[in-house]
Image (tube, rainbow, N blue to C red):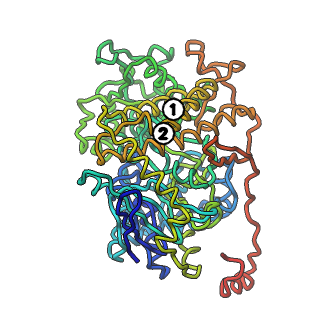
Amino acid sequence: MNQTLPICGYLVPIHSYQTLILGSGAAGFAAAERLFMAGHKDIALITEHVQAGTSRNTGSDKQTYYKLSLSGFQPDSIREMAYTLMDGGCVDGDLALCEAALSARCFLHLVDLGVPFPSNRYGEYVGYKTDHDPRSRATSAGPYTSKMMTEALEQVVLQNHTPIYDHMQAIRLLVHNEKLLGVLCLDLTKSQQKAQPSFAIFLCANLICATGGPAGIYYDSVYPHGHFGSSGIALEAGAAGKNLTEWQYGLASLHPRWNISGTYMQSLPRFFSTAADGSDERDFLRDFFEDPNDLLFKTFLKGYQWPFDARKAQDGSSIVDILVFQETKKGRRVFLDYRQNPVDPIDYEKLPPEAGDFLRRAGACLNTPYERLAQMNQPAVDFFLDKGVDLKTTPLEIALCAQHCNGGLGVDCWWQTRIQGLFSIGELSGTHGVYRPGGTALNAGQAGALRAAQYIAAQPLQTIPTGKEIIKQVGLQIKEMILLADKVLSPLPENVTDLIDSAQKRMSCCAAAFRSLEPMRDTLQYTKDTLFSLPDICHVKTPGHLKWLYRLRDILICQQAVLTAMIDYVEKGGKSRGSALYQDPGGLKPAPTLCDEFTFRLEETPLHQIQEILYKPCGPLTYWRDPRPLPEEDDFFENVWRRYRTDQNIY
């Protein structure tokens, strides 16, 4: 059912579907495919840009997919994997069990779709250990694992002829009495072509949000350009935020944005910094480490221990992250150099066995970092070459960047939020905790897509209200967004991207891997003030640039929730944990030469409770609860079979 209604002087097309999928990454395409497979075909997919997003445009030296062990003699089980996921802290047991139970099914489905995960000659899908992994559950199809997943799933969705509305930016989720009714979008193509903005309304009974993490809230970020997320409008709609304090930060290149993990570090590159203009080159790690072999070993360990970890700040490899951040805080630029050794010559016999044995077994005891990297992982070299960066001749600028939000929106075991009909999958959903094994995010997106699709397909079809009925229920929400565009369109000098940069830089400065209470409070007040006065202070010259207005608004809403969560955590007595170091004057510095902002105390008795947050215009409200336990089900086969046949107690 398609119609057009006049709203605030605009003719707005209205489209109706039983179920909409928002986002075109690996999770979004998986949801569309799973719905179609289940016979639920009145669906459509909405995306800002089908070629954008994290799944399609991010990776590492060897991007990891985490799943149940499928090879070798090492024992494993679904519940053991679920316990591993829960060991990360602040994880709900039912979600951990679902992700563990569906990991093999989802993984093998991707294999059948053509994603080239490696197997041995007998068909075993061999694995390796990743971070926070007691087994060898990790696997990889190479640097572009998630890209290949996305492309394989997209191909199926295209074959199914599922409608895809490209260049549609979701700017408001339409909710009435805690029930999802649809989504208001800015039509990016028509707004670019016309002298006035163009909007579209999509009505539905179910909306599966798969728009990724809140990538836009930080300035120092390894999320790909063009990925901003939509966490703000989901929080605004009434979905609960969960574990929003918990992120991952790690060293990443800036041009292009890419995780510098694994063999990028195990090849022992040289770190150096310069002034902003490229002058005054300094080997700042050599200035810090008295023992050159300690410098080499800490660099090597950053391959295994890529995310910043507060537990490794004192005596571990995360001191490298601190030193890089400290250099950039001084206004200096930091580079990785694969042309020269950090210490010359390298005596491989004097390296700790963990590093020395690894490099010897890899045949990588060679003369330069470039030669070592090429020997161990030529595709990692080729990636940068494809992007116009020859590591053999060109240093790589890096920074400590936001990489993944372990928190997100709170969901039940079918990945439905507290808003009826609103589902959240992929990084947008908060199924992870303080720590997580590397690669769990790719599995979580596939498992969540399957669970949401199963639940939706099992429900009876619903009557979608007409456009006029929707206007009566959520007309004010629609008009607020349209009138905001009218207010900010102005002949004054455009400043919307400057406002975005300013908001992002404040977050990266005080509320990323290193967090200080008073600066966070100041930033929260700045965020509130900017959001409140947005119609008056923001200026946009053309309808084609209105996308930045709505992105800024989403960023500010999300920043307000995240800052509130972080401040509440500190005020409840929380200390440094996970990928965050909270400044604490009563603590200790990892080294006496460091700045005082790195004074901290580790969480000795971790707060295992889950923090949730409800967004309110007057200020978000936080509350705490115990994690849901790992379910103890009656697994007697006849009982499970009977319930399955009759759908009793399943959905």
Q: Secondary structure at mark 1?
A: helix
Question: Is the residue 100 above or below the residue 563 in the image?
Answer: below
Q: Please tell me which residue is depicted at 25% across the width and 42% down the height of the picture.
A: 387
Question: Which picture quadrant has residue 219?
Answer: top left
Q: Position of residue 479 (x, y in %)?
A: 46, 55
Residue type at mark 1 is Met
Q: Secondary structure at mark 2?
A: helix
Residue highlighted by disc 2: 217
Spatial CA distance of label 2 from label 1 is 7 Å
Is residue 310 toward the left or the right of residue 306 in the image?
Answer: right
Q: Residues within 10 Å of mark 1 (few under 14, many from 20)?
A: many
Residue highlighted by disc 1: 507
Is residue 406 toward the left or the right of residue 648 in the image?
Answer: left
Q: Position of residue 642 (x, y in %)?
A: 71, 87
Q: Position of residue 515 (x, y in %)?
A: 59, 28
Question: Is the residue 455 above or below the residue 280 in the image?
Answer: below
